[in-house]
Image (cartoon, helix red, strand yellow):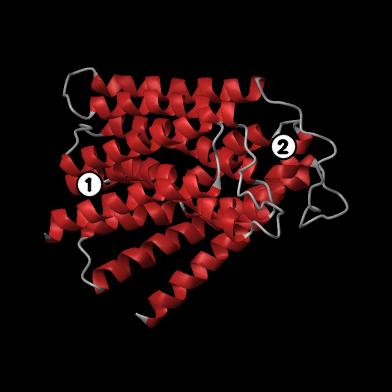
Amino acid sequence: MLLTIILFFASALAIYLACEFFVNGIEWCGRHMKLGATAVGTVLAAFGTALPESAVTFTAVVFGQTDKARDIGVGAAMGGPLVLATVAYAVVGGALWLNRRRLGRPDRTVQVDSKRLAGDQLAFLSIFVFKVALGLVAFAIKPWLGVLFLAAYALYVWREITNADTAPEEEELEDLKIRPHNATMGWAALQSLLALGVIAVASHTFVAQLETIGVAFGIAPHIVALLLSPVATELPEIMNTLIWVRQGKERLALANISGAMMIQATIPSALGIFFTPWLFDALLLVSGLITGLAIVFLWNIFRRGQVDCSRLVMVGGLYLAFAVYVGVHFYG
């Protein structure tokens, strides 16, 4: 158990430090590609940090030998969006509140492209409702519909890139960590890829130790799968948000979450639909309902431009509500 605890904290620290290198490198990649902050967050950073949790779903549904193993993959495809829509946004609000004086934000407002992110919430919600609806019915051609989710993500990336604003030249970036005086595209991409490799390995280690700790403390496997593992697999996005908020770049942080949510709504869903019956039980339906409520709430505050720390923290309460429901379901 001592080794498990050491690996647990060591892997969490490794993820954070690797994310420092990743966000630094990916910002320089965005600068060379002349992408604005929103596109850097929604496409480049989100795609990189979403790979670990997408790999969890892929391994479970493609190589899983039992129905239970494949169910874990489906749970990951539903748990990821739930954590992003609640915990990740709450982390942004909480981190900004803690750093409000240092960043000069006494009114606790969040600097964000509200109109664009409101559109992202609607796009995500339409895809998410469709994927949940597919979990309620069974029919012969359902596996083929996974192609629609891949096409939806490709369309989203195309829209983000083509509508991307040019990165402002006056925005200063920290020196590239591995090559401070020669931040070429090649070195920036190399740093990002190396950091991503560390994130992937450390994330896998972190999830494994979390599951071991859950078993040691007698936590039901379903609770670990539905509540703890999704938080662990979304840790890279959460770490990115902490780093960018600390730097006063909450626009990048929120764009990263938004882009990761779109990936979670499409790629893992497509894999689940391709390789499993994709039928939901009560717990998965409730997780879908909570996620949908969170998205509606976020869409409303982005649409109105009423984005501040307290409102973002509030959305985290929905995750707590789901945690209470799961606890009552298994132990009540």
Disc 1 marks a residue whose amino acid type is: Gln
Q: Which residue is drawn at 42% across and 52% down?
A: 233
Looking at the rendered structure, the kind of residue marked 2 is Gly
Of residues 132 and 248, the one nearer the viewer is 248
Give the residue number, with chain letter if any, for mark 2.
30
Residue extending farthest bottom = 2
Give the quadrant of the C terminus.
bottom left
> From this viewpoint, is residue 159 visible?
yes
Q: What residue appears at the point 34 percent right and 40 percent down from the top-left corner?
A: 77
The mark found on residue 65 in the picture is 1
Tell us which disc is closer to us: 2 or 1.
2
Q: Is 332 left, or right, of 94 in this rendering?
A: left
Q: Which quadrant of the view contains residue 288?
A: top left
Helix, strand or loop for disc 2: helix
State which quadrant residue 15 falls in: bottom right
Where is 132 relative to 204, above or below?
above
Camera-nearest residue between 318 and 24: 318
- Does 2 sit left or right of 163 as displayed? left
In the image, residue 267 sits, relative to residue 102, either above or below, namely: above
Report x, y in % for residue 284: 23, 41
